[in-house]
Image (cartoon, helix red, strand yellow):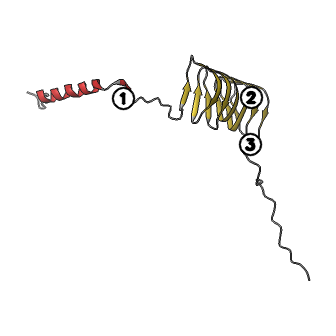
Amino acid sequence: MGLFKRDEPTLPSMANNAREKQKTKEIPKKERAVSLKTDDITTILGKGSEFEGKLQFEGTLRIEGIYSGEIKSDSVLVVGEGAKVSAEVDIGTIIINGEVNGNVRAKQCVEIRKPGKLVGNIQSPCLIIEQGVVFEGSCKMENISAKPGKPAFPAEPEKNKKEIE
């Protein structure tokens, strides 16, 4: 006889386990939550997709396929490693891992990561290029989104002058 006795499941508890298993099998696949681990990405043009035209979006767009045309947004565009984009791009931020042919205007930043390739001109206040990428074109770094108005360093205020009578 052993010192510890393992409790054997009784028939009612075995029936409950069977009912629980049956409930999980009854849930349709459509109702199950799927975690993509890409909380920031709101739209994906996947591998094997080809799209041509004018594209406007909000949130973050990731292109993994082939796109040609025009892209306008104040949001984030991610060009995947196998993607080929031939477009005039007017964007908030672009991260290039694939191939982009066309001029890029970014209000915030252009980032080219290895093994990315950009053939075209860049206009952006921020440019990040990793070692090992290809960039053929010119770059003009200026703040596109800044509106003319108050200067960054205002002139010194005039001192009050007393009139001599």
Residue 20, located in which quarter of the rendered image?
Answer: top left
| Numbered mark located on residue 143 in the image | 3
**Residue annotated with mark 1:** 31
| Numbered mark located on residue 103 in the image | 2
| Numbered mark located on residue 7 in the image | none
Q: Type of residue at label 1?
A: Glu
Q: Residue at 11% across / 28% down in the picture? A: 2
Is residue 10 at least partly visible in the picture?
Answer: no
Q: Residue at 76% across / 55% down in the picture? A: 150
Q: Type of residue at label 2?
A: Asn
Spatial separation of the CA atoms under disc 3 and disc 2: 16 Å
Residue neighbourhood size for the residue with mark 1, other residues' Cα within 10 Å, grouped as few (<14), some (14–19), many (≥20): few
Q: Position of residue 39 (x, y in %)?
A: 50, 34
Residue 145, located in which quarter of the rendered image?
Answer: top right
Is residue 155 at least partly visible in the picture?
Answer: yes
Q: Quadrant of the N terminus?
A: top left
Count of number-bearing discs = 3
